[in-house]
Amino acid sequence: MSKFLDHMSEYFARRKGLLPIVGLALIVVNLVIQFILPGSFLALSNLFLHIGLIIAIFGLMLAWAL
């Protein structure tokens, strides 16, 4: 587990903006789903919005720490 965390830390240290961009992309996907599939579970639960927001905030905190 320690080697995995070291590897991921070095990977994201070189790519500080990757997680916030992925989070923003998921938020945009959620917006598109709202218009394409308005009655589906994904649209009603805003699943991609919540996951994207968590990933973006985590990415900003991780980039600030690294």
Image (cartoon, grey):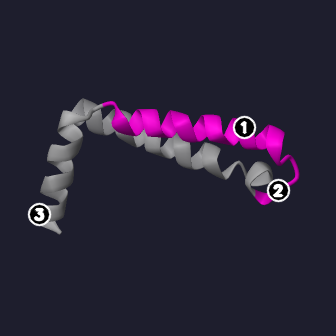
Q: Is residue 66 visible?
A: no
Q: Which residue is mark 1?
A: 32
Residue 30 on the magenta span: yes
Residue 58 at what x, y percent from top left?
A: 39, 42
Q: Is 43 in front, or is 50?
A: 43
User: Which comes before the other along the chain, label 2 or label 1?
Assistant: 1
Position of 8 relative to 30 (above/below): below
Q: Which residue is mark 2?
A: 40
Residue 16 at what x, y percent from top left?
A: 27, 32
Quadrant where the N terminus lies?
bottom left
Image quadrant assignment for residue 60: top left
Amino acid at the residue labelled 3: Lys
Asked whether disc 3 touches disc 1, contact meaning CB atoms under 8 Å apart, the reply is no
Q: Disc 3 and disc 1: Cα gap in Å?
A: 38 Å
Amino acid at the residue labelled 2: Ser
Q: Is residue 24 visible?
A: yes
Q: Identify the residue at image location x=71%, y=36%.
A: 31
Q: Identify the residue at image location x=44%, y=33%.
A: 21
Q: Which residue is mark 3?
A: 3
User: Which comes before the other along the chain, label 3 or label 1?
Assistant: 3
Circle 3 or circle 1, nearest the eye: 1
